[in-house]
Image: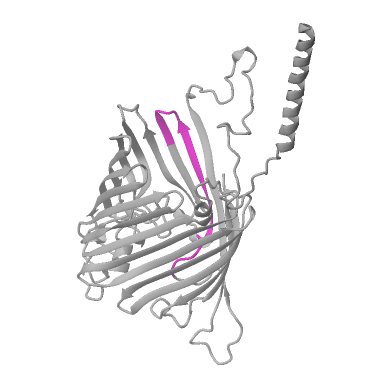
Amino acid sequence: MVRLQYRYASLVHVALLLAAGAAGAEEAVPAVPADSSPGSSVPPGLGLAPEAPPAPPAPGGRAPSFGAPTPAPASSFRLGGRLFGWEAVGIGRTPGTAPECYSGTALHMPALSNGRNPFWGGAGATLNFQYGTSLVTAFAGYYINMNRKEYQGYQNPGRGPAFGYAYLLVNPPSIGTLRLQFKVGGYSEVFAGPGQWGWGIYGPLMGLRGYGETTYGDWNMTPDLHLSLTHGLLVVPGVSEDFARGDAFGWIERGVSSYVHHAHVGVDYKNQYFLKLHAAWDYGTDDRRHSNTFLNETARDGRMDTYLAEARWQSDPWGQVGLSGGLYNFRHATSVGDGVWWAIDWTQGAREMIYKFVGTGSHGNGKVLVASAEYDFSVSKILWSPRNFTGAAPDIRVAIAGMIYKTVASDDPYYNGATGYFVGLETEYRMTSLFSVTFQSYGESRDTYAGPWQVYSLNPGIAFHSDWWSSDRIQLIYSRRFYSSAADPNSAQPLDHHMIALGGYITF
């Protein structure tokens, strides 16, 4: 009797298990694969990348398992670079001095234009070398400018190949939460750029270069509050004023030397709110005795001081907003060489700043206030929130920038009180992994003695790239440009209002 009850109990257990399995099979629903459209479901992960191979250690234990920590190598070498090339064809206009029998349409290559272009003209390449250990690393960059051969020769070899930078970066062990770095050599540095990665559409408000050293300090004051300190000294040596090739290399000027002292302090909170202060003092010593300055005045020592503040907010998924502003102070700055190489727009030392914003009648004296802002965001990242957007889907990327400035003091009456502005919009609609539609628009205006100097442009284009994340591309751009009479004053050779550009770049 006991055996019979045991058999019946076993049969009941088996029946219950079979019924439960059948019910589970009926209720099971195949998983819907995740797609790349906003609102799609995302399956939960286990914290390990699917492509990670479950490889055991090599026979004999000669290599660690995949993903296991390994000791840092004694030294390493890296080589990278970029190849680029652009050519633009301008559709010319009838000259104002053309005779009545003039006919046809002139094509200019390169195009005759003014103001900002949506590409870097010409062709060239960059090679970046890195070799060292975790303690000391050497960096070097080699630039090759392959623009038209008439610009490459004895008098201007800077248009050909040349070293761009070479320096050592020293990373000593941390002292508690304090980390130090030391950079020594010849290099460039930029500060106060309102863009997402520190540069932006119109660049930083302070760019320095020369030969010297810079010390960086980072200190985690609390888990949420971080302090950074930077201090450096750079020198741009000159050569004697009778040196035949004194102006051949872009970093030096005959008879003039520059000494740049700069300091920076910044704090950030939760890696979301940033505030930084920047200051640089560029002293120019002028040893010329037989030649005058570029304003045809007697040579004398001078200086250019820069004081800037930078604020930034970034938050996922809304993007980032950057705001920078400050003051440039010029004191007989015609002798200030190329220690400062970027300020408002591209500037070689104080020379371009004086030409554009202080005036040729200023004797190198003046003050300029500036404010620059930029907003960068991704439309898909906002739509996908709160899920993470990886970039492997259609997206619209937008950057909006603006800059205003005013000459608050100048010895040149035409520029004293002069104002100006820059506006810019850059968008890219990545339709597929291989194809994008682009649109860039720029405008700039500044007061001059000849009237408002204004250039505006509309630049639609198409771009081809290898995948969603590719930084390489081939791009075709059409540009429609608008000039004021001060920006296009030569009626005998008017600037091109229509331009077509083709080019691209490859990084490795």
Estimate the x, y position of residue 469 in percent, counting from the top left: 57, 48
Q: Is residue 24 visible?
A: yes
Above or below, comparing residue 283 to residue 366 in the picture: above
Q: Is residue 123 magenta?
A: yes
Q: Residue at x 29, y 46 (%)?
A: 235
Q: Residue at x 29, y 48 (%)?
A: 276
Q: Is residue 109 magenta?
A: no
Question: The N terminus is located in which quarter?
Answer: top right
Estimate the x, y position of residue 384 in percent, counting from the top left: 53, 51
Q: Residue at x 32, y 55 (%)?
A: 253
Task: Judge by depth and name the residue closer to the eye, 357 or 456.
Answer: 456
Q: Residue at x 46, y 43 (%)?
A: 141
- From which residue to which does the magenta span run? 115-138
Residue found at the far front of this picture: 1
Q: Is residue 244 visible?
A: no
Above or below, comparing residue 233 to residue 21 in the picture: below
Quarter of the figure with residue 371: bottom left
Task: Judge by depth and name the residue closer to the eye, 72 or 373.
Answer: 373
Estimate the x, y position of residue 61 in percent, counting from the top left: 60, 14
Residue found at the far top of this picture: 2
